[in-house]
């Protein structure tokens, strides 16, 4: 089992690449940890469970929430994070992914990666000797999904349980759409993707979600009938209609989504009164959602955004803390400081540090 700076591994390494890699029980356990660490944050008492530990953060694409939440989470847990972006590291260009994974594993205690292609995160995880966390790929966004599950559990309709709720995802089949579909059906919720035919969730996603439902009792459906779908929604979720590499498709996409699939007051008026509005952000205001909805009383988008921080704390601790040995005692640290002091003195340095 590989050694880490400052500790010894006592459990095998777990990666966080897809929520489908975990059972409902394991994900529930993670949600419990997120709740605990959110409470600790409210009391200004987040324990430094990752004291002195390092998170390497690879970002092939820009990010606000994922970057900031992981970095702040590490600091709150007593560690620190390094922002590693293409052009500043050799990732996959002047150095193989394998070598990058091996090198980062020797220097960092955990790796987060947002990559253009899902295969890149999968390969990093296969080669790394420390936990690798998927911070969004072209396929999925599992840290967002866990955060959204947690946020939904905080905003359940009165007297209802998760497996009695319906999530309606309106718009393009984005990576957030796939992750929401998977986690909702893992937890026995009803999930509906409402989109124009050419932008609906593909059969392979529906197959995964259907298998989840066979186990959880949930349901999955894909429809063009957004009005009927929203009428049964407890949560209406949307995401961007195009990403930066799809800008040449904007006119075609706008034509097919607008106005029917825009989440505006008219569409939200079709939903039950208690239904909440969700968006992973960033949002294109006036495109997939109007200001009146995203800033309105049914919107929980900033709760989602804040919960990214608590979710990242939970994920980092869940994957990393149990694999670390106990921290070195103050006595052991002092022993090494004394040895360094003596060594430098012996080789001729006048060590200025005051000795006790
Ligand atoms: N929701 C989300 O992942 O946001 P960022 O792209 O800002 O990280």
Image (cartoon, rainbow, N blue to C red):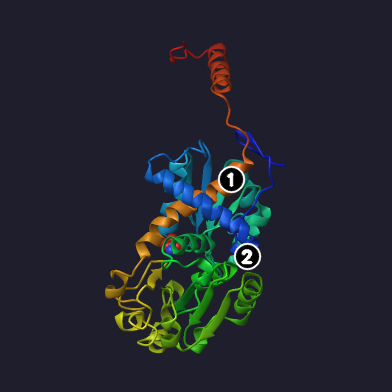
| Nearer-N-terminus badge (2/1) | 2
Residue assigned mark 2:
20
Is any atom of residue 88 visible in this view?
A: no
Residue 115: x and y, percent? 54, 62
- Residue 105 drawn at (x, y percent): 62, 45
Answer left or right for 344 relative to 1: left
Left or right: residue 214 compared with residue 278: right
Give the residue displayed 66% in from the left and 54% down from the top: 98
Give the CA separation, mark 2 to mark 1.
19 Å
Say which residue label 1 marks.
320
Q: Nearer the viewer, residue 94 or 199?
A: 199
**Relative to 70, residue 335 above or below:** above
Between 311 and 114, the one nearer to me in the picture:
311
Mark number for residue 140? none
Q: Secondary structure at mark 1?
A: helix
**Circles 2, 1 touching at the beta carbon (< 8 Å):** no
**Badge 1: how crowded within 10 Å, few (<14), some, or many (20+)?**
many
Q: Position of residue 114 (x, y in %)?
A: 52, 60
Which of the image's four quarters has the N terminus?
A: top right
Q: Is residue 315 visible?
A: yes
Give residue 134's position: percent from left, percent from top.
55, 59
**Who's the residue at 56% across and 67% down the image?**
183
Q: Is residue 319 above or below residue 151?
A: above
């Amino acid at each position: 089992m590989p050694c880490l700076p400052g500790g010894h591994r006592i459990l095998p390494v777990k990666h966080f690449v897809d929520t489908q890699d975990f059972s409902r029980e394991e994900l529930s356990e993670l949600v419990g940890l997120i709740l605990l660490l959110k409470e600790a944050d409210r009391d200004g008492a987040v324990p430094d469970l990752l004291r002195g530990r390092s998170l390497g953060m690879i970002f092939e694409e820009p990010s606000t929430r994922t970057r900031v939440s992981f970095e702040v989470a590490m600091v709150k847990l007593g560690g620190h994070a390094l922002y590693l972006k293409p052009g500043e590291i050799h990732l996959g260009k002047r150095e193989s992914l394998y070598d990058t994974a091996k090198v980062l594993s020797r220097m960092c205690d955990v790796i987060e990666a947002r990559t253009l292609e899902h295969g890149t995160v999968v390969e990093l995880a296969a080669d790394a000797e420390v936990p690798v966390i998927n911070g969004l790929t072209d396929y999925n966004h599992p840290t967002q999904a866990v955060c959204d599950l947690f946020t939904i559990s905080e905003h359940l309709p009165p007297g209802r349980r998760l497996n009695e709720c319906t999530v309606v995802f309106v718009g393009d089949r984005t990576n957030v759409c796939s992750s929401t579909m998977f986690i909702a059906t893992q937890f026995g919720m009803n999930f509906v993707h409402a989109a124009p035919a050419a932008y609906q969730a593909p059969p392979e996603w529906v197959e995964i979600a259907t298998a989840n439902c066979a186990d959880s009792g949930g349901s999955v459906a894909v429809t063009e009938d957004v009005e009927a779908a929203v009428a049964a929604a407890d949560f209406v979720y949307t995401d961007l209609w195009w990403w930066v590499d799809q800008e040449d498709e904007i006119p075609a996409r706008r034509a097919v989504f607008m106005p029917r699939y825009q989440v505006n007051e008219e569409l939200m008026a079709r939903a039950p009164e208690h239904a909440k509005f969700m968006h992973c952000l960033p949002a294109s205001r006036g495109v997939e959602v109007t200001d009146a909805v995203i800033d309105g009383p049914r919107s929980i988008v900033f709760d989602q955004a804040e919960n990214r921080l608590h979710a990242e704390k939970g994920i980092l601790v869940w994957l990393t803390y149990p694999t670390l040995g106990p921290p070195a005692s103050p006595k052991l640290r002092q022993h090494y400081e004394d040895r360094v002091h003596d060594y430098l003195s012996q080789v001729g340095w006048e060590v200025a540090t005051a000795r006790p």
